[in-house]
Image (cartoon, rainbow, N blue to C red):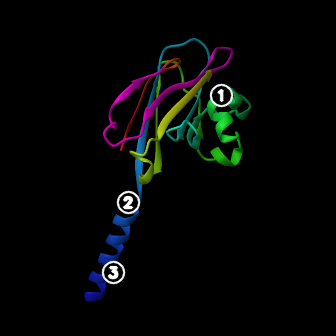
Amino acid sequence: MNKSLLTAGLLLAMCLFHNAQAADVSITTSLNTFRGDGAYLAIYLTDASGKYNRTLWVAGSKSKYYKHLLDWSRGGGNKAAEYDGVTGASVLSGDSLTVHAVIDDALIDAGYLIRVDSAVEDQREHRIDAEIALTRQGAGNSVQGRGYVKTLSYSL
């Protein structure tokens, strides 16, 4: 009986320790109405100076168009290994996309930003279409986009 309690206690402690190191972040990007095919979006993290940190999600499955997601493609080097497994379909006019990412707690309230670059085929590209500071206090708030993105928000 004591071994069972000890084992359960150790497992609980390990789970709490693991959860204290990373946060599950839900990021929602709502798009304006636009003409044309679906929008390609790159959702990524930068540090306070705007230096690329990592890709959180890429909406749009044809990698030949990723070069049009201007700041993201420059910062991330546009390497397939970097975004493998974090891609999905493009986002249609007026739709919303919610993605989940596990982000190290040390990056929250440390000046990091969630950014979105956007592009639509045969239309304009928007570097830093939207960005929001990654803070505990900012969770649940939204910011306006500058192009195809209507709003960007996240929750912890």
Q: Is mark 2 on a helix, strand or loop?
A: helix
Q: What's the mark number on residue 19?
A: 2
Work out which residue is located at the far right of the displayed protein and give it.
64
The three-letter amino acid code for the residue at tag 2 is: Asn
Q: Which residue is drawn at 61% across and 47% down?
A: 85
Q: In which quarter of the image is residue 27?
A: top left
Question: How far separated are the C-alphas under marks 2 and 1?
Answer: 34 Å
Residue with the mark numbered 1: 70
Q: Distance between the residues labelled 3 and 1?
A: 50 Å
Q: Which residue lies furthest to the front in this view?
A: 49
User: Residue at image x 68%, y 31%?
Assistant: 66
Residue 138 colored magenta? yes
Q: In which quarter of the image is the C terminus?
A: top left
Element under disc 1: helix
**For the point 53% across and 37% down, which residue is it?**
49
Determine the image quadrant of residue 86: top right
Q: Which of marks 2 and 3 is in front?
A: 2
Q: Which of marks 2 and 3 is nearer the N terminus?
A: 3
Please provide the residue range marked out in magenta: 120-145
Q: Can residue 1 be seen in this view?
A: no
Q: Which three-letter amino acid code belongs to the residue tagged 3?
A: Thr
Specify few, some or many for label 3: CA neighbours under 10 Å numbering under 14, 14-19, or 20 or more. few
Q: Quick one: SS at disc 3?
A: helix
